[in-house]
Image (cartoon, helix red, strand yellow):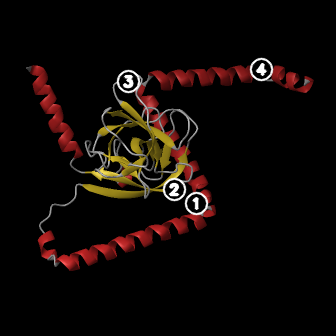
């Protein structure tokens, strides 16, 4: 102990110097937008590189489980393709009829999760793709199980995602059978459950009924699974129901995801902005 005290006393000026340097840098990055932006971009790239290395090791260790999951997904896809061919053949649908259909506005960019937190109030995911791959904030993120979250921040090579298990997350949803709309929100606690709020009192949802995206926003297409109803309750004001939802995605093992790009999103947002501006003028 005495040696530690002697060491601190001997180099106390250096300790004071580094302390003051850290304080000055904190003030510089906190109150100057440009310096703060440069710092965040640089730090995000460095941390992203570290997460990539860690994620590579973790991914290699978990290859056996990942291969089993991929094989199960391939088997499901093969079954669906076979069923589609059977239905098309049974109904004698001419595939030429489909040539004039409009190109889907939703496209998908594959990415890997290289870091994830599940025990914080504001959990985040880090992806190994960024603006260089066409990813921008406010894009939806899904995996084979269902909805993961929404892109929050991006750099050239990495993206930060706000998952469902973040207390600031709000995702428009609906009950698959009743077509009743609401919002999925997360309360700090288990990463397996969230809550569907805003459900009218007269709706009689069933246990294990699927909760899915409503398609009311441009972020997610309709019909993507979010979870299943676990239990029922009322909101704090007693005016609506609050349904406990068992989430479809296991955030403790998530690895491969897809980022949804919507090429019509910017046009729609611009049109809605103009409309709001005109209404405010009146």
Residue placed under numbered mark 2 in the picture: 255
Q: How many other residues sit within 10 Å of disc 1, few (<14), some (14-19) or many (≥20)? A: some
Which mark is nearer the camera, 1 or 4?
1
Depth check, front residue: 131 or 9 = 131
Residue placed under numbered mark 4 in the picture: 12
Q: CA distance from mark 1 to mark 2?
A: 8 Å
| Residue 75: % across, % down | 44, 72
Q: How many callouts does the rendering have?
A: 4
Residue at horizontal 46 percent and vertical 32 percent from the top: 167
| Residue 56: % across, % down | 58, 58
Residue placed under numbered mark 1 in the picture: 59
Instruction: Say which element carries label 1.
Output: helix
Q: CA distance from mark 4 to mark 3?
A: 61 Å
Q: Residue 238 got which mark?
A: 3
Q: CA distance from mark 1 to mark 3?
A: 46 Å
Does 208 sit above or below residue 171? below
Left or right relative to 282: residue 43: right
Q: How many other residues sit within 10 Å of disc 4, few (<14), some (14-19) or many (≥20)? A: few
Which mark is nearer the camera, 4 or 3?
3
Which mark is nearer the camera, 1 or 3?
3
Depth check, front residue: 11 or 242 = 242
| Residue 26: % across, % down | 55, 24
| Residue 47 figure quarter | top right
N-terminal of the two: label 2 or label 4? 4
Q: Residue 155 got which mark?
A: none
N-terminal of the two: label 1 or label 3? 1
- CB under 8 Å between callouts 1 and 2? yes
Q: How many other residues sit within 10 Å of disc 2, few (<14), some (14-19) or many (≥20)? A: many
Depth check, front residue: 39 or 212 = 212
């Amino acid at each position: 102990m005495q040696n530690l005290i002697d060491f601190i006393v001997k180099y106390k000026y250096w300790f004071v110097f580094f302390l003051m340097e850290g304080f000055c840098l904190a003030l510089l990055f906190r109150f100057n937008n440009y310096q703060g932006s440069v710092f965040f971009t640089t730090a995000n790239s460095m941390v992203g590189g570290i997460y990539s290395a860690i994620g590579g090791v973790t991914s290699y260790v978990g290859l056996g489980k990942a291969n089993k999951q991929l094989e199960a997904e391939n088997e499901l896809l093969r079954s669906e393709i076979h069923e589609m061919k059977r239905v098309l053949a049974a109904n004698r649908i001419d595939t030429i009829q489909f040539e004039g259909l409009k190109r889907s506005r939703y496209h998908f960019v594959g990415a890997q999760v290289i870091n994830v937190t599940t025990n914080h109030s504001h959990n985040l995911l880090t992806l190994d793709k960024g603006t260089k791959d066409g990813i921008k904030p406010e894009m939806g993120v899904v995996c084979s199980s269902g909805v993961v979250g929404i892109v929050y921040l991006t750099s050239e090579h990495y993206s930060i995602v706000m998952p469902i298990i973040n207390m600031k997350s709000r995702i428009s949803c609906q009950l698959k059978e009743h077509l009743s709309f609401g919002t999925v929100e997360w309360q700090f606690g288990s990463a397996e459950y969230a809550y569907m709020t805003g459900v009218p009192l007269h709706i009689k949802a069933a246990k294990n009924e699927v909760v899915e995206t409503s398609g009311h926003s441009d972020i997610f297409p309709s019909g993507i699974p979010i979870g299943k109803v676990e239990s029922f309750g009322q909101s704090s004001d007693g005016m609506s129901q609050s349904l406990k939802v068992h989430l479809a995605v296991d955030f403790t093992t998530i690895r491969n995801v897809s980022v949804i790009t919507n090429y019509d999103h910017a046009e729609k947002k611009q049109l809605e902005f103009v409309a709001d501006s005109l209404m405010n003028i009146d």
